[in-house]
Image (cartoon, helix red, strand yellow):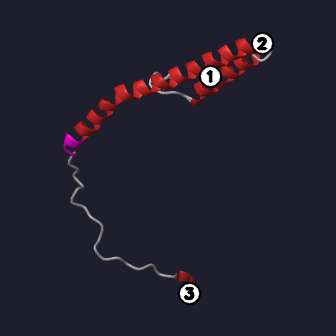
Amino acid sequence: MNAIMHNQISLRMIFALTTLLAVVIACFQNLPSGVIVSAFMAMLTMLIVTFALFALAFMVMLPFAQLGKYLDDQSDDGSSPFAQDRLPSQIIPPVDRGAE
């Protein structure tokens, strides 16, 4: 299995981004209020842009997922040599061996 999966967001990556964001916030803690506000707005903008890119990626990939579902519905099921085998029609009740 490939260690780097390009089509998925891993929990490790989310933890790393959260840690990085916490370090950046800690660095800006002792700055004057005007710089803190602008840094906060920059971080908020980065967060909004990240979610917007995720939404855009989702919207781009959604038609391909629907196409995949459509193509799966159109394909015929493979025939099995055991397709005619069925369970017996008679249901046999269980025997309580503890009462004997």
Q: Which residues are magenta?
A: 73-77
Which residue is the site of mark 1? 17
Residue 73: x and y in percent read 23, 43
Q: Is residue 23 above or below residue 80?
A: above
Badge 2 crowding class, 10 Å Cα cut-off, few under 14, some 14 to 19, many 20 or more, is few
Residue farthest front in this picture: 34
Between the residue at mark 1 and the residue at mark 2, the CA separation in whole angstroms equals: 22 Å
Q: Is residue 15 above or below residue 98?
A: above
Main secondary structure type of the part rendered in magenta: loop
Between the residue at mark 3 and the residue at mark 1, the CA separation in whole angstroms equals: 63 Å
Residue 54: x and y in percent read 46, 26
As shown in the figure, which amino acid type bears the numbered disc 2? Leu
Between 46 and 93, the one nearer to me in the picture: 46
Q: Which mark is residue 63?
A: none
Residue 19: x and y in percent read 68, 23
Q: Secondary structure under badge 2?
A: loop
Q: Residue at x 62, y 22 (%)?
A: 17
Q: Is residue 95 above or below residue 68?
A: below
Between 40 and 64, the one nearer to me in the picture: 40
Q: Residue at x 57, y 23 (%)?
A: 47
Which residue is the site of mark 3? 99
Q: Secondary structure under badge 1?
A: helix
Instruction: Tell me if residue 18 is in the magenta stretch.
Output: no
As shown in the figure, which amino acid type bears the numbered disc 1? Leu
Q: Is residue 79 left or right of residue 29?
A: left
Q: Is residue 71 above or below residue 48?
A: below
Which residue is the site of mark 2? 31
Quadrant hosting residue 24: top right
